Amino acid sequence: MTESIAGWIWGRNLRAFLELLSGYAGYAFDETDWESIEAGVQDTDDEAPDSWYSYPLVGPNATFEVALAQAVGGQEVSVSVAGIKTPELRLRADTLLSAFGSVRQPACSTAAHHVPLPLDGLDA
């Protein structure tokens, strides 16, 4: 059975979230993926379903379709992950959403892993 999970994370944690989720699929997330996602999510609005950005993470362990949209006026990114086929993957993906939605400091201290969203400097 294929299931989806949805929630939100802080925008500054988006890359780390996607890197870890990709690992569960067995997909080697790289700079090209990040550049595509970073550009794609810029003009999204989580209140406009047609504006969400969708990106596949296809690996030997799983195939996820990740839909992303920024919260206009906030630092949050809404996330939906489709293609979750096992209870273990559901638990892992749900845990990532919970963790990256509650961490208030950047997930990584290096600038290369920092999500430069337009609202990045605001206090959450």
Image: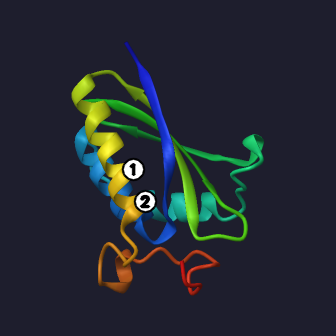
| Local secondary structure at mark 2 | helix
Q: Quick check: 81 left or right of 51? A: left
Q: Residue at x 37, y 77 (%)?
A: 106
Q: Residue 91, can we see it?
A: yes
Q: At which x and y percent is residue 39?
A: 60, 64
Which image quadrant is residue 122 in? Answer: bottom right
In the picture, which quadrant includes the C terminus? Answer: bottom right
Which mark is on residue 97? 1
Q: What residue do we see at 36% from left, 80% from top? A: 112
> On residue 101, which mark appears?
2
Residue 15 vs residue 75, the one in the foreground: 75
For this view, does 59 lie left or right of residue 9?
left
Farthest residue toward the top?
1
79 vs 24, left or right, is right
Q: Position of residue 10 (x, y in %)?
A: 48, 65
- Find residue 118 and report its image quarter: bottom right
Callout 1–callout 2 Cβ contact below 8 Å: yes
Tell me the amino acid under the disc marked 1: Leu
Report x, y in % for residue 55: 52, 44
Distance from the alpha carbon under mark 1 to that under mark 2: 6 Å
How is the protein colored in the picture? rainbow
* Residue 30 in view (yes/no): no
Left-right relation of 45 to 122:
right
Which residue is located at x 37 percent, y 60 percent? 100
Q: Work out whether 91 lies above or below 29.
A: above
Q: Locate the N terminus and report the quarter of the image it occupies.
A: top left
Front residue of 89 and 35: 89
x 31%, y 56%: residue: 19
